Amino acid sequence: MLAAPPLHQLDGKYRVLAQLGQGGTANVSLAALRGLSGFNKLVVLKSMKHSLKSEPEFARMFMTEARLAARLNHPNIVQTNEVFEFHGLPVIVMEYLEGQPLSNVLVRAAGKDCFTLAMHLRVLSDTLGGLHYSHELEDYDGTPLGVVHRDVSPHNVFVTFDGQVKLLDFGIAKLAGSHSETTTGVIKGKLRYMPPEQIAAEGVDRRSDIYSMGVMLWEALTGGKMWHGLSEATVMNRILGGQIARARDINPAIAPELELIVEKALASDIDERFSTALEMQTALDEYIDTLDDPPNHRQIGKAVATLFADERKQTRDVIEEQLSKVASLSEAEFERMQPIELTTFASVSGAEPTQTKSHEREVLSARRTRAVGLAALAAAVLTLFAVLGWGYLRSEQPPPAPAAPSSVVPVPVVPARVTLRVTAFPGTAKLYLGGELLPSNPLSQSFARDPDKTVMLVAEAAGHERETRVVRLDQDLDIVLTLTPEPPVVEPQARPKVKPRKGRASAASSEANCNPPHFFDERGVKKYKPRCL
């Protein structure tokens, strides 16, 4: 199979300026929409990888996103201009956004007063507005599409330099009636913003996205990550067990109205959450309106533009230079040109300074690996220059003096009991510990600490292979088991019975004696009996 021509050779009204990046399913490019009299407008082209053209699941996901993107038209959702086909591959044309993902804004604003809690709440409110629109979207015949985003997080909320808020990345969105089922043990989306029903593959609806917004609100109110420093297995088990710390316990200054909103959004029981994103947005807006000086979009945009002033200028300079260069080329010259790759800068970030906060590393890593919604990346990738610059300046400073050794050696406190948290997929699996059936799956249960004893943990489910794990109850444990489906049983085909030829004894009966010493098989071939030779 021949490879598709490079996207930058796309003739017609688009000229690619730079390759922004790539994800698991798509390549993303910054391009100029060419018009009359030298008119150019920046757009972002997202095209499915040619290598995935023969993969039905990935092709279906990309086409679902393309069809949905073409229908979405709301000021708080990234705008899709058109969807077309290039050498058999779908291409989504999106608006170019000047700004930063909310995840980057929060990292840069940490410890500063320019991006206030009130501004953060307004951004979340606008995001809820975009979510509600997508949840309410109908087909042309009036049938509800039942859109569920399934990946709502600060990485997929974009704040422009004029204060507009855009929800990005409907790449794994689910539509009502779609046949997209999650493979056992495979979780789509960001685990740390995911509701329990999505982890357990029990079916999702619009209230699942509301839970994700609840996590974002919790982090806004506490000023930290909900699951900072915890392993994926621990996070999964605590979400499924509803073990979420109250925001007020971390920040006692939280307003009671906001505490009620975040607790309702984060309810483990989906029926106890807000029924719609609009309901949650209304509750949030009612609180914002009680503030002495509610923030407006101009103030939000100014704050973000101030935080990223240097990156904004650098980005504009790079784009203007590339736009001028590409616009002056003939068609033949342009086809021979290789566009610059802005992701070259991202590859340098592998040498991140050790003083970078862990949640900042998470943001940078997510930005490098996610191509979905990369309308933001033309501005965002140059943030890495600042990160690397900080690392250089910090390396020039002398290391801190080592702390004086303490003469008092603390005695560690050994707990008398430990907690075992276990989740097994599928959800119908039964758990056994030491041969005894455990009461639930998922499980969170306290046991007496016994460092010298090992026990067998077993998970069983119909139609799946048994999964076992040897555990020692000497410390708290978080375990996730994914059972492998049993291969289908193939019934052996019965050999057709062959009617003996008329006038001849069957092979079975003739084997009983040696008179005669031979027999004729089903094809009429004469064969001698081994014991009669």
Image: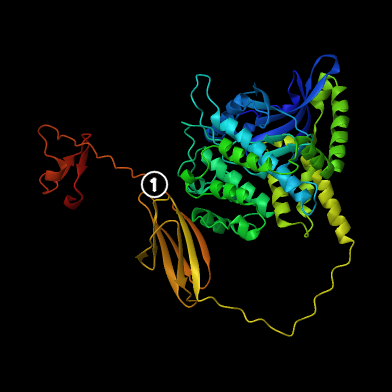
Residue in view at x 49 percent, y 73 percent: 417
In which quadrant will I find the N terminus? top right
Residue in view at x 79 percent, y 34 percent: 162
Amino acid on which the number 1 mark rests in the picture:
Pro
Where disc 1 sits, the SS reads loop
Query: Is 525 drawn above or below residue 383 in the view shown?
Result: above
Q: Residue 6, position in %: x, y?
A: 72, 29
Query: Is 287 drawn above or below residue 130 in the view shown?
Result: below
Q: Is residue 54 visible?
A: no
Residue in view at x 58 percent, y 35 percent: 278
Residue in view at x 79 percent, y 35 percent: 298
Q: Residue 402, position in %: x, y?
A: 81, 74
Residue lying furthest bottom? 407
Front residue (pair 62, 403): 403
Left or right of 435 on screen, residue 478: right
Query: Is 200 drawn above or below residue 447 in the view shown?
Result: above
Give the mark count: 1
Q: Residue 470, position in %: x, y?
A: 46, 67
- Category of crowding for the residue at label 1, using alpha-carbon neighbours closer than 10 angstroms: few (below 14), some (14–19), many (at least 20): few
Left or right of 140 on screen, residue 82: right
Front residue (pair 446, 254): 254
Q: Residue 347, position in %: x, y?
A: 77, 46
Query: Is 17 drawn above or below residue 509 in the view shown?
Result: above
Q: Which residue is mark 1?
A: 487
Q: Quadrant of residue 222?
A: bottom right
Give the color scheme: rainbow, by chain, secondary structure or one colour: rainbow
Front residue (pair 333, 282): 282
Left or right of 516 on screen, residue 240: right
Q: Is residue 315 visible?
A: yes
Left or right of 378 on screen, residue 313: right
Front residue (pair 511, 223): 223
